[in-house]
Amino acid sequence: MDCRAFRDKHVAFVDDLLPAVEMDAMQDHLTVCSRCSHQDTAIRRSLMIVRSLPSIEPSPDFVARLNARLEEMGPVSRVDLVAPRPYLPSVGAFAALAAGVAAVAYMAIETTRYFTPPQDTHLAPAVASAFEPVPIANAAFVASVPTGMPVWPAVLMVGQAPIHFANMEFRDAVETIR
């Protein structure tokens, strides 16, 4: 028998609850191992001291005083008996939180690369020129938009809308310049 097995079974050994074979093995280990023998002696002496203490006798009016005190306090619910335990996160929860923060930081840094224009890009200057408006190919397009007719005729001719509206804006700008 090794010391760990002796310590694991020592309470049952002191209370004489082990089978005879194990009791003999525990006794044999005590004769061989001085550390376990000293521990056994210390535990048995402390048990003897506790058992030899006189029993505590409460005063004759103890029960009456206790009941009066309990009545003063009022009823106690089970919730009052259980103290709230402070939340202490585990190492795994801390690691998961740190990994999440690192992932969000990485994604934030990576997305700035997509939305930040390169520093050495030079755009050509914008040049405005005036031109004559192109006539509208279909008058139904013009009639359908402002009169509240169904939108489908406008959808069919949506390809002409940007040209027409851009031409209208340029024509108005040209006329104000002239």
Image: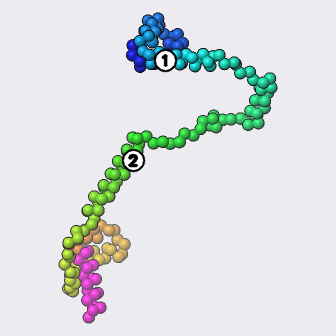
Predominant SS of the magenta segment:
helix
Decide which of 125, 173 is in the foreground and name it.
125
Where residue 51 appears, as percent x and y from the top left, is 63, 16
Q: Amino acid at mark 1?
A: His
The segment highlighted magenta reads 161-178
The residue lying at 25 percent from left, 75 percent from top is 162
In the rendered image of this protein, does residue 78 appear above or below residue 106? above
Where residue 174 appears, as percent x and y from the top left, is 25, 89
Q: Amino acid at mark 2?
A: Leu
Decide which of 42, 143 is in the foreground and name it.
42
Which scheme is used to colour this image of the protein? rainbow
Whole-number angstrom distance, CA of label 1 to CA of label 2: 49 Å
The residue lying at 41 percent from left, 18 percent from top is 3
Q: Secondary structure at mark 1?
A: helix
Q: Mark 2 and mark 1 in contact (Cβ < 8 Å)?
A: no
Q: Secondary structure at mark 2?
A: helix
Residue 133 visible to an observer of this rendering: no
Decide which of 163, 9 is in the foreground and name it.
9
Q: Of tags 1 and 2, which is closer to the observer? A: 1
Q: Is residue 86 left or right of residue 120?
A: right
Q: Which mark is residue 116?
A: none
Residue 142 location, quadrant? bottom left
In the rendered image of this protein, does residue 139 appear above or below residue 177? above
Quadrant housing the C terminus: bottom left
Q: Which mark is residue 97?
A: 2
Disc 1 target residue? 38
The residue lying at 20 percent from left, 75 percent from top is 122
Q: How many marks?
A: 2
Where residue 10 appears, as percent x and y from the top left, is 48, 16
Residue farthest to the bottom? 178
The residue lying at 78 percent from left, 32 percent from top is 68
Residue 93 location, quadrant? top left
